[in-house]
Image (tube, helix red, strand yellow):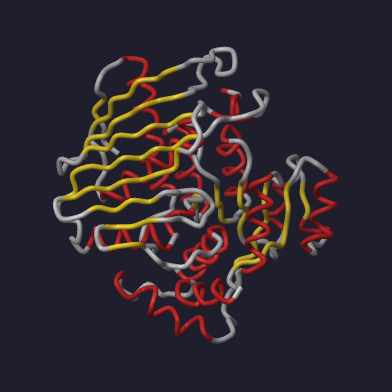
Amino acid sequence: MNSRRHFLQKIAAATIAIPFSSQLVSATKLYNRSYDGPVLRVAIMGLGGYGTRVAEAMRDCKMAKLVGVISGHPSKIIAWQSKYNIPEKNCYNYENFDNIKDNPDIDAVYVITPNGLHHDEAIRVAKAGKHVICEKPMTLNAKLGQEMIDTCKKANVKLLVGYRMHFEAKTLEIVRMRKAGEFGKILFFQGLSGFVIGDPAQWRLNKELAGGGALMDIGIYSINGSRYMIGEEPVWVTAEETKTNPEKFKEGVDETIQFQLGFPGGAVASCLSTYSMNNLDSFFLNGTQGFAELQPSTGYGPIQGRTHKGELTQPHVTHQTVQMEEMSAIILQGKQPIVAVDGEEALKDLKIIDAIYEATKSGKKIELKV
């Protein structure tokens, strides 16, 4: 607990004016004292496994608080009410949650439901005048993602996406080193993202709800990671799909995809996304003057890593705690994160995902403009 508190003191309340290199250190003075600033009051939509993880992590937040729930399961609502001290007036189901527009005690809704539901649910939240936090992938494709962005802008609410790694300390140290030129010219990135998925009846293997397969679920980490590690946007993609179990992985649900991304500076990313292999959670970045590697790179932690200068020793703190603290600062204080977490950031990943799927079908190199 002491290490967690110490780390939060370093990162949670930085202001826009703090430069990148000193952001973590300068924030310490602001967070050392008891926090008495604005608090983001959040309702969680979707009370499954990850929703529970976020709720538990928010117990340690000072700048964000769980105040409401939205679920189609009355029994879950009752259990969460008791566990998290949530008032009845802040509890909704999927039929009546538009009524949050009349609830001044909820500022934002965190949408943690299957991918195929994000678009419609986020739009309803935005039209109710509440800020939207949406799990990744933001939705099923770039077209739907743009609609979410446009609706949130029209409603004058924020749209943020749950890119928790954008606030993770070891990840940010590599980003800092790359920006400082410590790796030299970036040449290559490798991202391996995969695990053996279980129950074939789960929503992640349902094309309508998931939008695809492993790429939408775990592969997005390598897609997104290639971008913030290299520091550029890809301009082409090639990809090949392998399917060994068509009964489990139906049409439109990918089992394994190998994909390559080309970047304008000459760097290439080689990535693997799979639902059929365990022990795949690693990033490797190579430049003319050094390297960085993370393994595990995107799990819930602790993340482990090293560079050509030695082991990365930044302390671990619960990712979702840091994410919600930082998102509170973005929404309520206008803070600019080191790596973006807004709808436009998520839209870039969706454009790449669309292109990867196109490449797997055509067998051709697809030019990109994200």
Which quadrant would the N terminus be assigned to in this image?
Answer: bottom right
x, y percent for residue 360: 36, 19
Please tell me whether residue 19 is drawn above or below residue 203 in the rendered image: below
Judge from the rendering whether residue 139 lies leftward or rightward of residue 345; answer left or right.
right
- Hey, which quadrant is residue 71 in on the image? top right
- Identified at 31% across, 40% down, the residue is 190
* Image: 49 above or below 139: below
The quarter in which the C terminus is drawn is top left
> Residue 329, relative to residue 293: is it above or below?
below
**Identity of the residue drawn at 34% across and 34% down:** 271
Q: What residue lies at 80% left-to-right and 60% top-to-bottom? A: 83
Q: Given the current orientation, which residue lies at the most extreme front position? A: 310
Residue 279 in percent (x, y) is at 48, 38
Residue 222 percent across, percent down from the top left:
39, 40
The image quadrant of residue 350 is top left
The image quadrant of residue 180 is: bottom left
* Residue 305, position as x, y percentages in the image: 38, 56
Viewer-proximal residue among 72 and 311: 311
209 to the left or right of 294: right
Q: Foreground: 21 or 318?
A: 318
Which residue lies at the image location 44% right of the left edge and 60% below the top edge?
167
Observer-nearest of 223 and 369: 223
Q: Is residue 252 above or below residue 7?
A: above
Count of marks, rendered view: 0
Return the residue nearer the eye: 343 or 183.
183
